[in-house]
Image (spheres, rainbow, N blue to C red):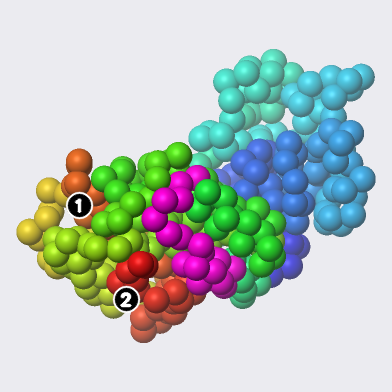
């Protein structure tokens, strides 16, 4: 979708809230609404024009990337951000300006409060996020590519993993594979943990050595063109005991049945209910957050879990990632990134979910 269309859609939302300006600072929102690909920048959206506010490091880049905006350089000698926004507000005669209340800092709010005397500051929540909830074709194709990169990296890393090598070495190689395949960076800090550490949902790779009998959780993703993929696979090394195989197959079944409940019109709770019914003997070891939207941010709406009632819509991109985590023993998680469709879903991460046991 063109940037101009996104701005127009946002203006509609702003009108509903009765504000004539909207100041944005959440990086994912700034990028979405402007096309800018870097950080430390702000936008002010109004019916009378759109302003991209950044410092001297980024003005040239912004002029190129944001043709729908007037680029404004802030900082000395003009003054603070509040001064800069106030100058625009005075020129345009703005009466009220919205801001992201979950992102605005107290210090910046104080600055705005002091400088924007004639303007009402209106706290807002999720206006741009509402537009980002359903992905357009271009966004989906970026996520699809990020998922393809993760799939290729998974295939390659299987040749690299062997007993005696550390988690950190494997994580580094995995990240290298993604960069080599076209990722601009990792989508988030790689979770690559083994043995009893696998009960830590977000454990960090370290110098722990991968040993015979270990399960390994690989939860990682690529960043491509500003969009993230998110996939988890659990694999085994050498001789796995029966309980590990049993729990693996249970999680695999739960994830598959969870996926099959996904379609437009359902909500995150439905998926959770289904998964819970499959893993019921292990419910004490289950973590209720079993999925989330993914796009410009790793975790965004809609979320999937027991208390998640937001309706899944066609072309929402989400993850489904149930797991069983037994403290001191270990855990299993399986996760795919998928697109919600009218009658089901399309899987974007396509790596196998058959239990892989490396020798
Ligand atoms: Mn995830």
Q: Main secondary structure of the magenta part?
A: helix
Q: Residue furthest toward the bottom? A: 343
**Corner quadrant of residue 242:** bottom left
**Corner quadrant of residue 214:** bottom left
* Magenta-colored stretch includes residue 282: no
**Which residue is rendered at x = 40% and y = 45% of the image?**
209
| Magenta extent | 147-168
**Which residue is rendered at x = 89% and y = 54% of the image?**
64
Q: Position of residue 23 (x, y in %)?
A: 68, 39
Q: Secondary structure at mark 2?
A: loop
Camera-nearest residue between 351 and 205:
205
Q: Secondary structure at mark 1?
A: loop
Residue that label 2 marks? 354
Camera-nearest residue between 343 and 327:
327
Left-right relation of 341 to 248: right
User: How many angstroms separate mark 1 from mark 2 (CA)?
Assistant: 21 Å
Q: Position of residue 276 (x, y in %)?
A: 16, 61
**Which residue is rendered at x = 34% and y = 71% of the image?**
356
Q: Is residue 25 visible?
A: yes
Which quadrant: the C terminus? bottom left
Q: Which mark is first along the chain, 2 or 1? A: 1
Q: Position of residue 152 (x, y in %)?
A: 56, 71
Left-right relation of 310 to 91: left
Residue that label 1 marks? 286
Q: Is mark 2 within 8 Å of ligand 1?
A: no
Q: Residue furthest toward the left? A: 281
Q: Is residue 146 above or below residue 29?
A: below
């Amino acid at each position: 979708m063109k940037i101009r269309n996104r701005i127009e859609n946002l203006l509609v939302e702003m009108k509903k809230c009765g504000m004539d300006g909207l100041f944005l600072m959440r990086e994912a929102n700034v990028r979405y609404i402007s096309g800018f690909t870097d950080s430390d920048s702000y936008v002010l959206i109004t019916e009378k024009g759109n302003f991209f506010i950044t410092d001297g490091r980024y003005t040239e880049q912004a002029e190129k990337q944001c043709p729908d905006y007037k680029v404004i350089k802030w900082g000395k000698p003009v003054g603070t951000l509040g001064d800069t926004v106030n100058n625009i507000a005075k020129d345009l005669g703005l009466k009220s300006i919205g801001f992201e209340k979950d992102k605005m800092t107290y210090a910046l709010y104080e600055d705005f409060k002091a400088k924007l005397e004639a303007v009402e500051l209106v706290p807002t929540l999720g206006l741009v996020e509402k537009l980002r909830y359903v992905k357009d074709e271009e966004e989906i194709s970026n996520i699809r590519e990020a998922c393809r990169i993760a799939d290729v990296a998974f295939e390659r890393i299987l040749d690299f993993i062997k007993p005696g090598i550390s988690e950190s070495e494997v994580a580094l190689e995995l990240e290298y594979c993604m960069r080599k395949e076209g990722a601009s960076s990792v989508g988030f800090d790689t979770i690559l943990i083994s043995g009893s550490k696998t009960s830590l949902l977000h454990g960090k790779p370290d110098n722990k050595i991968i040993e015979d009998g270990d399960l390994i959780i690989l939860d990682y993703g690529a960043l491509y063109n500003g969009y993230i993929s998110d996939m988890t696979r659990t694999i085994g090394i050498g001789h796995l005991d029966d309980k590990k195989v049993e729990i693996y197959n249970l999680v695999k079944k739960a994830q598959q049945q969870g996926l099959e409940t996904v379609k437009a019109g359902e909500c995150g709770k439905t998926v959770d209910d289904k998964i819970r019914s499959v893993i019921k003997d292990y419910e004490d070891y289950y973590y209720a957050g079993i999925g989330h939207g993914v796009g410009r941010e790793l975790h965004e709406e809609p979320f999937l879990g027991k208390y998640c009632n937001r309706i899944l819509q066609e072309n929402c991109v989400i993850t489904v990632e149930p797991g069983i985590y037994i403290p001191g023993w270990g855990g299993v998680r399986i996760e795919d990134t998928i697109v919600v469709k009218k009658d089901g879903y399309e899987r974007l991460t396509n790596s196998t979910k058959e239990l892989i046991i490396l020798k």
